[in-house]
Image (cartoon, rainbow, N blue to C red):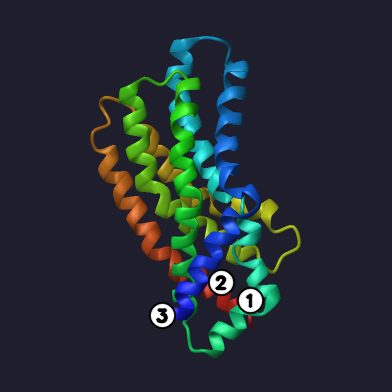
Amino acid sequence: MTTLLALFWRDLRRAWGSGALWLPVLFFLLVATAFPFAVGPDAPLLRRAGGGMVWVAALLAALLPIDRLVRPDRDAGVLDQLAVRGIADEVIAAVKILAHAIAFGVPLMIALFPAAALLAQDAARVEVLAIGIATAVPALASLAVLSAALTAGLKGGSAIGGLLVLPLAVPLLIFGAGMLDPSGRGAMKLLGATSLLLTMIGPFAAGAAMRGLRE
């Protein structure tokens, strides 16, 4: 347990070191600032499309740091040392998912509010967005760690990391954006079920990928 706690805090410190804590915030604000220039100063259009843009930005923010989630530990032999101590790869993956969920989830929720304001989202839609993204954060973290584990042994793997998990992330985007539709009452339940499923599958899939790195 002490080793796992040390791994958790080390991943969290590495994620927030050198100002990385604010990367999702800056990314969100950049998207929110640039998007109105692309669609024009049409407030009703921004209001309709802005929610979906926030969800896409949330997915990309989760995938931003995949280069440092697994590869440094693989190159430094940390994964081998943990395996020698008898710690299962699935447990290691679960700890990394938890650390990543907190590392990018907290600044993500902070960035949501100014970004949503720039995208002409009213208070009711901001509340729905906040609930939806908070629900999806564990699943997004699972997909990011899975992508990192799958691409840790590849040169330039981060370039294709997003492509690997995009099909799995599509339901999150669909149900998350569907929550913004007044008639989409079931979208919240579907989003929660999808997030729970991906969060449960993530450690096992990422653990298997990490085990493959040692073979």
Quadrant of image for the C terminus: bottom right
Amino acid type assigned to the residue bearing label 1 in the image:
Leu
Label annotation for residue 1: 3
Identify whether 64 is placed above or below 8.
above
- Position in image of residue 125 (x %, y %): 34, 26
Assess whether mark 1 and mark 3 are in contact (beta carbons under 8 angstroms).
no
Residue of label 2: 209
Please rate how many residues cluster around mark 3, counting C-alpha atoms within 10 Å: few if below 14, some from 14 to 19, many from 20: few
Assess whether mark 2 and mark 1 are in contact (beta carbons under 8 angstroms).
yes
- Residue 7 shown left or right of residue 171 in the figure: right
Examine the rendering and report whether any part of residue 179 can be seen: no
Which structural element holds mark 3?
loop
Residue at the image point whose x is 43% and y is 40% from the top: 109
Residue at the image point whose x is 50% and y is 30% from the top: 53
Residue of label 1: 213
Q: Nearer the viewer, mark 3 or mark 2?
A: 3
Q: Nearer the viewer, mark 3 or mark 1?
A: 3
- Residue 173 shown left or right of residue 214 in the figure: left
In front of the other: 210 or 84: 84
- Residue 82 shown left or right of residue 139 in the figure: right
| C-alpha gap between disc 1 and disc 2 | 7 Å
| C-alpha gap between disc 3 and disc 1 | 24 Å
Residue at the image point whose x is 53% and y is 37% from the top: 57
- Position in image of residue 47 (x %, y %): 43, 18
Mark 3 or mark 2, earlier in chain: 3
Mark 3 or mark 1, earlier in chain: 3
Which structural element holds mark 2?
helix
